[in-house]
Amino acid sequence: MSVIKVQALSKTFGALKAVDQLSFEVEAGQVYGFLGQNGSGKSTTIRMLLSLIHPSEGKIEIFGKSLTDHRSAILEQIGAVIERPDLYPYLTAQEHLTLFAKLRKQKISAAKIEATLSQVGLLARAHDKVQTYSLGMKQRLGIGIALLHDPALIILDEPTNGLDPQGIADIRQLIKSLSKDQGKTVLVSSHLLSEIEQIATHILIIHQGKKMAEGPTSSLLDPNKTIVQIKTLDDQDAKQKLMDSAYRANILERSEGLYLSIPKLDIPGLNTFLVASNIALLSLESKNSLEDYFLQLTSTY
Amino acid sequence: MWPIIQIELFKIYKRPRTYIAFGAIAALILVIQMGLKIDGEAYAAFLMKDINDTLTVDGKVLNGYLICYILLQLLLVHVPLLVALIAADMLSGEANLGTLRLLFTTPYSRTQWVLAKFVAASLYTILLLIWLAFLALFLSMWIFGTDDLFLMKSNYVVLIQEQDVFWRYLGAFVFASFSLLTVAALGFLMSSLANNSIGPIVATISAIVFFTILSTLNIPLFNVVKPYLFTTHMNNWKEFFDIQVNESNDAITGSILNVAKIKNSILVLTVHIGLFVGASIWIMKKKDILS
């Protein structure tokens, strides 16, 4: 069953098309990773899913219902953290959770509030004002508010922003647990490939508002492949020689530099080829950044 | 909608800024009361200097009722600025903090949130007015005692008997609540247009100053629009203190000279409140929450 179904969703701000004909489906129980660089349209899409931004075109269905027609009933079952953990600086964590508990139809007990504070590691600071919290603590409180009413769908936009390594590991563990142990559906966005790779069962890659790729994590992120950047004394000559070789299909088009997408195990062979072809090699570097992954994707599309 | 009104009231209660207006009103009133207590007789003599030759006034001119009238004349011009501090920040302050998205992703609609925020801002405004009434009226009555109210208008004097004064103040405070709620609604409208705290507060105060000038200037071009400006009507609480007289020029106890003027002003102010709040709802419903 599709928990989220998005069809041909677009959003235009003046001349800028922030989201362009985006379609995807999230099934129940999935941890759906929404991956893209800053400004790629992730947050705009998430805000449309939460009815914060009005779409220019397209349809959104959540829990099988139109978001436009059943907004209130849908939002009752969603918990969300959107970008920064913005909270009321003059209220405490306890007061935040108590206030947001009042907004839900089901009664949320004081014990549940305490359990949530404990779950996000804020029990000891529950009565301190948020203005005294670190960014990581605010992020954890934001997640606490999102989880308080036991929602079926959890939407987390860049949830590990500002967290220390232990905090990131805790959130990662929490997301996995929400899916595995509690059967929740989680949509999580990030610009960090490594983050998404570790938690998501499915991934959608978005770039300049358009869907670049979508599918199970295991098939999208092939750990055996890498992007190699080659620096030589004469890149034009090197490129020509590579074009005339079996590596032709691996060359990636880019305005600057010489890049190839090849299996990791082929790197020694490439090195041997470059030396044997009398190419004056300065460096040969394996790249694994998201940007390079995008490059690989765009070259195949 | 009660839970979200409660939440909004709780947030107002917890915000340090809330208490600035209460503190400012208390400080102003106490300073004026202290000044009049110490040097009030000289002030009263100054007020009466033009009529002392033709009129003899028995009793205590400088009593709690007159002090309250003086205070209201001074303060009801400035209290709107204090109301704007809170009302003009209700929506834009949340947008600036980034918390508007927390509220708008709850099951309550944007219309419900805007209305809840306006109700909370209105309750705050009324509490401020009650505080003002407590200090300006009750405290003045306690410090200065009570007697007949003697008012000097531009070309006539009004003498209202002691037992006929108190209810007029109640009426004046109820009227003032409409004036201040209009300011709160205007601040709300400005707040719906911005994503920062300062802009709407300045814009609200500027709009009040601008329209007050238009209402005050006696230029034929502006006279056409004056009856429709909220600033023309905001100070009409004073109408409660103009009294009808009989054929022998004696004041008629319990009467108001121009009841129709008060009713008309309340109607104009109510229409403004409705328009400002309605426009705020419309704007917030259309708005993309990008903050």
Image (cartoon, helix red, strand yellow):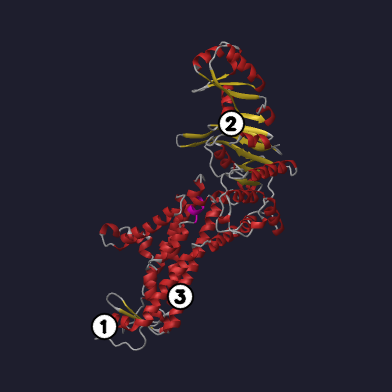
Q: Which residue shows up at 32% across the image and 87% down it?
A: B57
Cβ atoms at labels 1 and 3 below 8 Å apart: no
Per the rendered image, the range of residues in magenta is B90-95
The CA distance from mark 2 to mark 3 is 65 Å
What residue is disc 1 on? B51
Mark sitting on residue A290? 2
- Tell whether position A116 is magenta: no
Q: Main secondary structure of the magenta part?
A: helix
Residue B242 appears at what percent x and percent y?
36, 76
Q: Closer to the observer: label 2 or label 3?
A: 2
Judge left or right: residue B210 versus residue B176. Answer: left
Residue A296 appears at what percent x and percent y?
59, 24
- State whether residue A107 appears in this view: no
Q: Which residue shows up at 26% across the image and 59% down it?
A: B220
Do pointers 1 and 2 mark residues of a single chain? no
Amino acid type at circle 2 is Leu
Foreground of the two, A292 or A78:
A292
Q: Closer to the observer: label 1 or label 3?
A: 3
Residue B245 appears at what percent x and percent y?
34, 80
Q: Which chain does tag 3 point to?
A: B
Figure check: A28 above or below A256: below
Judge left or right: residue B221 versus residue B200. Answer: left
Figure check: A94 above or below B291: below
What residue is disc 3 on? B135
Residue A226 appears at what percent x and percent y?
62, 25
The CA distance from mark 1 to mark 3 is 30 Å
Mark 3: few, some, or many residues within 10 Å (few <14, many ≥20)?
Answer: many
Q: Which chain does tag 1 point to?
A: B
Judge left or right: residue A180 versus residue B5. Answer: right
